[in-house]
Image: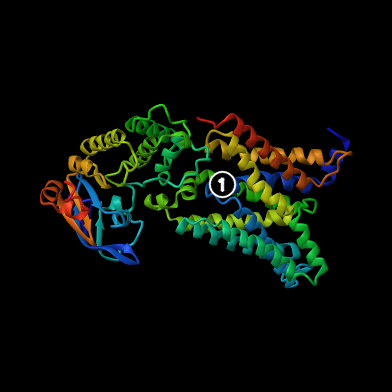
């Protein structure tokens, strides 16, 4: 273990821990997007949260303490509400009409990105903040972020264990879920709210690129490698966390010094590409 | 309301999506009956089945059912094809388990129920196969198996033999007949296959130009109602 990495761990204990907890949390959420065939929706929800942050900054809620909440809390509230609205409405539309939301997701993604920039075009501090979120920077995460990330991970794990089969049926076949007496609207709202909150927090703590990357890449990787859905949901969070740890290690080598969020996403993207190519050459897994 | 012995009944039911496709259907479904729903493409067969399964609200009339059907615990619904992506690594056993998604069961109970159903549908030992490598006939059996896991008293099947070769279709229908007779299952089955309907149906709902002809299968075949409705009279 290199001295540089150990020094970085001591210096950035909270950001690293937050990143690792989110790397275990986000693939658990991305799994449901994969089942709904809406991987890009993750990017749209992340961008919607960035627009929410921009609205908070535009309203002057991004500095100091206002109405008893710190600037960070206001950003998460606005980003969370914006992301939740997009997540709930999108899941609802999917359950109701079984329509493909690709075009709408792209529109939300583009509107979120451009809208955030335009809102803050005359506010250099706000513009810098939004640009930071839209790239990736996990080094600003605090000890509070560790607690929040840990709590979100715990709640998500417990809820998924408790409602695993119901969520599977809801995600894959809402019509059949209704035929079996489930009410998809309850799951659209509950999952959408959880999704929006987690993605907004993750975007705030680690940036959009890392958030979207960790939502989808571990799940896509495990989809190629696993023989069952049960294995995908078990292994994707482990792969997300270990990929991030490896990226943190590589990024903090003296001769490299890369931004860790980008390093984690690039590493996982290359892994997905290599596995995909290998699988295509070797043929499908049968059982 | 339903009278003793009835699982589901309708009175002057109107079904459709915004505009009526079928009006005035009055019918009673009882255990061990096998109802085929016949009609041309677009006549409203699937819409009727979706309405009876509680997936669409009726546009008019009344729909009565026993408690087990109302809360869906005794209802098995078999769609033509579930919207599953071929790229998902879903195993056959995992797919079947979804039939119990709304019920609280232990892992042990679920595994035992899935193993028993795999035997029933003739796919014993294939539980670990991926959904994407199953043949169409195996997928149709899996859809029936998922519904059977719920131990239904009424099973609604939306064209379960469409696109299958005649041998596979006949085998599936034979298996359904065995289940009907051995478990007292009531089957409600939309189809275009008149040969199977003539051989296995006990009753028919024939949809013709927005109206339903209901009655014993022998009678409706013998009086030419089916031939007139489906336009097969000139061919025979």
Instruction: Name the residue located 26 percent from the left edge and 44 percent from the top edge.
Output: B153
Question: Residue A268 at what x, y percent from top left?
Answer: 70, 41
Residue A131 appears in which quarter of the rendering?
Answer: bottom right
Q: How many labels does the image show?
A: 1
Q: Is residue B58 above or below residue B34?
A: below
Residue B106 seen in render: yes
The image quadrant where one finds the N terminus of chain A is: top right
Residue A205 appears in which quarter of the rendering?
Answer: bottom right
Instruction: Name the residue located 48 percent from the left edge and 34 percent from the top edge.
Output: B130
Q: In the image, is B193 to the left or to the right of A37?
A: left
The numbered mark 1 sits on a residue in which chain? A
Instruction: Name the residue located 44 percent from the left edge and 35 percent from the top edge.
Output: B92
Question: Residue A101 at what x, y percent from top left?
Answer: 54, 57
Viewer-nearest residue: A20 or A222: A222
Question: Residue B82 at what x, y percent from top left?
Answer: 42, 46
Q: In the image, is A275 to the left or to the right of B112?
A: right
| Kind of element beneath mark 1 | helix
Provide the residue designation for mark 1: A34
Question: Residue B181 at what x, y percent from top left?
Answer: 20, 37
Residue B4 seen in render: no
Instruction: Name the residue located 81 percent from the left edge and 41 percent from the top edge.
Output: A251
Q: Is residue B127 above or below residue B38?
A: above
State the residue lying farthest toward the top: B125
Q: In this view, does B45 lie above or below A62?
A: above
What sort of colour scheme is used for the picture?
A: rainbow
């Amino acid at each position: 273990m290199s001295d540089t990495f150990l020094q970085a761990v001591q210096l950035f204990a909270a950001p690293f821990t937050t990143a690792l907890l989110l790397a275990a949390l986000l693939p658990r959420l991305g799994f449901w997007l994969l089942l709904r065939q809406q991987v890009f929706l993750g990017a749209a929800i992340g961008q919607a949260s960035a627009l929410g942050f921009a609205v908070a900054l535009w309203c002057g809620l991004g500095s100091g303490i206002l109405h008893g909440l710190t600037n960070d809390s206001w950003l998460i509230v606005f980003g969370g509400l914006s992301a939740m609205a997009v997540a709930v409405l999108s899941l609802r539309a999917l359950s109701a009409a079984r329509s493909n939301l690709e075009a709408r997701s792209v529109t939300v993604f583009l509107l979120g990105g451009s809208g955030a920039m335009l809102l803050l075009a005359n506010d250099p501090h706000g513009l810098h903040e939004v640009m930071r979120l839209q790239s990736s920077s996990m080094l600003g995460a605090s000890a509070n972020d560790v607690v929040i990330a840990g709590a979100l991970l715990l709640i998500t794990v417990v809820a998924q264990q408790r409602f695993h089969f119901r969520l599977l049926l809801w995600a894959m076949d809402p019509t059949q879920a209704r035929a079996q007496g489930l009410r998809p609207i309850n799951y659209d709202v509950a999952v959408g709210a959880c999704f929006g909150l987690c993605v907004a927090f993750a975007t705030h703590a680690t940036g959009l690129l890392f958030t979207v990357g960790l939502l989808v890449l571990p799940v896509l990787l495990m989809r190629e490698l696993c023989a069952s859905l049960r294995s995908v949901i078990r292994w994707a969070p482990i792969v997300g966390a270990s990929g991030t740890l490896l990226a943190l290690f590589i990024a903090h080598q003296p001769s490299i010094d890369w931004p860790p969020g980008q390093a984690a996403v690039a590493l996982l993207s290359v892994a997905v590409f290599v596995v995909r190519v290998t699988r295509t050459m070797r043929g499908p897994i049968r059982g | 309301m339903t009278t003793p012995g009835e699982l589901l009944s309708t009175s002057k039911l109107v079904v459709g999506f915004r505009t009526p496709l079928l009006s005035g259907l009055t019918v009673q479904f009882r255990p061990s009956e096998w109802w085929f729903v016949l009609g041309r493409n677009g006549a409203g067969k699937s819409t009727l089945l979706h309405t009876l399964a509680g997936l669409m609200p009726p546009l008019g009339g009344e729909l009565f059912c026993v408690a087990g059907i109302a809360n869906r615990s005794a209802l098995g619904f078999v769609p033509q094809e579930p919207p599953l992506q071929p790229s998902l690594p879903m195993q056959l056993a995992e797919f079947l388990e979804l039939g119990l998604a709304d019920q609280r069961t232990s892992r042990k109970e679920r595994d035992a129920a899935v193993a028993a159903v795999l035997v029933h549908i003739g796919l014993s030992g294939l539980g670990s196969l991926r959904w994407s490598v199953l043949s169409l006939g195996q997928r149709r059996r899996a859809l029936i198996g998922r519904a059977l896991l719920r131990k239904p008293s009424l099973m609604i099947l939306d064209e379960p033999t469409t696109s299958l070769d005649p041998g596979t279709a006949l085998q599936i229908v034979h298996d359904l007949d065995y289940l009907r007779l051995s478990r007292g299952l009531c089957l409600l089955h939309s189809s275009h296959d008149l040969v199977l309907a003539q051989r296995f149906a006990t009753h028919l709902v024939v949809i013709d130009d927005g109206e339903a002809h209901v009655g014993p299968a022998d009678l409706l075949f013998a009086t030419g109602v089916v031939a007139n409705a489906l336009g097969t009279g000139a061919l025979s």
